[in-house]
Amino acid sequence: MTTASDSGRADGLDSGGEDPPPARPRDSGRSRGSVREVFLVATRLGLTSFGGPIAHLGYFRSEYVTRRRWFDERTYADLVALCQFLPGPASSQLGIAIGTLRAGVAGGIAAWVGFTLPSAIALVAFGLLTVRLDVAGAGWLHGLMLVAAAVVALAVVQMARRLTPDRRRIAVAAVAAAISIAVATPFTQVVLILAGGALGVPLLRGVLAREAARASETAAPPTLLPVPIGRRAGVAALTAFVVLLVGLPLLRQLAPSQPLAMADTFYRAGALVFGGGHLILPLLHGPVVGSGWVSEATFLGGYGAAQAVPGPLSTFAAYLGAVMIPAPNGIAGAALALGAIFLPSFLLVFGALPFWHQLRASPRAGAMLAGTNAVVVGILAAALWAPIWTSSVHSAIDLAVVAVAFGLLAGLRLPPWIVVVLGAVAGQALQGAGLS
């Protein structure tokens, strides 16, 4: 499978070309590991992996390929491509896939728990504190909203550079952004994502196929790792994924309740995230803020705070669950939201791994991924404008804070948690001086 980053050298103006023959996999002699081993390594990553979804891939490569040699470079790259192709938070799915290949299904669960719980616990604590103190209108909260604007702006720039490297994909992203702004509904985002995958095949398949052919001339044959999940189990997992995606909205209509509505909202968001965890923001904003579950400031303030913790960005759901359910049940709300948003990742990874070796050799799958990722850039760019920019940047001083935060992240490359702290301090100081 060709990843979007692999295709970054092409202009993408010629859609012709033939598919290259897939390289013949070679067997792996690597031994299996233990669930405990997987959990300890994943917990270490969950405590130290700052910087967001793209940075996580670098941390994983350093730990699993360079340091521990659980996988070779080619196998790791193909696993990354698989998780980018699947909807869902790519870094979390990559951890689940690595844990599963190393120590079975229990290893996949252990990898997720270790990587996810540190940031989830921190964000739940922040959410419960936010509810208890009633921080509506606080200056530091506005500062977090401004940092969120800078973080998403940087994500748009980085993703555009990596995922829209040619004129065709730039055009797809621009059209997706325009439609997302004009028709701002979750249904619109789903239609755009599906359309991007469909357009990727005729627009990009030829270019990606020729790049894969050139790369295969020097690349070693891919390693064939044993997958501890059978095809029947894989089909069952994929079936469950679809049944829940279709069935939860129906159950929500038949038996209205907040827990069921939350399960549907967060499951659907986790099932439709493409291209990185930042897309979780536009997918959750409409259902969560539009339903009156949380305010705009609470939503964006929590998203800003999520940049200060290590681990997956999708643990933002735990914060939302904690502030959506009245005390003393905030922890139960956090657990419901967290479980619902990550359940699709487990079902998709367990469903796709038995067919991984076929997917990794499919130019059609790579072209669909490239088209989908171009749409994701457009959707995220639209979210940068509304709700983020329109809700947080109200003055020239606000714009200056966003610009400084962006410069610290992109220019000086300061760790995001430092910028988050500085943004909160700046917001409180500006409010104290009567400037915000």
Image (cartoon, helix red, strand yellow):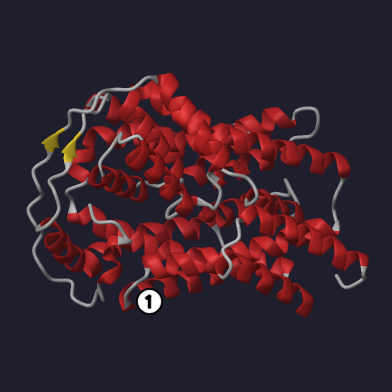
Residue 289 placement, left or right of 48? right
Q: In the picture, which quadrant includes the C terminus?
A: bottom right
Estimate the x, y position of residue 352 in percent, counting from the top left. Answer: 29, 37
Residue lying at 64% horizontally and 38% vertically, measured from the top left: 318
Residue 406 position (above or below residue 191) = below
Would residue 264 be seen by someone viewing this image from the given angle? Answer: no
Estimate the x, y position of residue 59 in percent, counting from the top left. Answer: 44, 46
Residue lying at 55% horizontally and 72% vertically, measured from the top left: 182
Could you say which is closer to the camera, residue 400 or residue 164? Answer: 400
Estimate the x, y position of residue 397 in percent, counting from the top left. Answer: 78, 76
State the SS at label 1.
Answer: helix
Estimate the x, y position of residue 326 in percent, counting from the top left. Answer: 79, 34
Residue 364 placement, left or right of 274? left
Could you say which is closer to the camera, residue 8 or residue 388? Answer: 8
Picture quadrant where residue 164 is located: bottom left
Residue 219 position (above or below residue 264) = below
Callout 1 amino acid: Ala
Residue lying at 10% horizontally and 68% vertically, measured from the top left: 17
Residue lying at 26% horizontally and 46% vertically, measured from the top left: 73
Residue 370 placement, left or right of 344? left
* Residue that label 1 marks: 171
Residue 157 position (above or below residue 234) = below
Q: Which residue is situated farthest in the front direction here?
A: 67
Picture quadrant where residue 345 is located: top left
Graded by Cα atoms within 10 Å as few (under 14), some (14 to 19) or many (20 or more), the crowding at tag 1 reads: some
Would residue 312 be seen by someone viewing this image from the given angle? Answer: yes
**How many discs mark residues in the rendered view?**
1
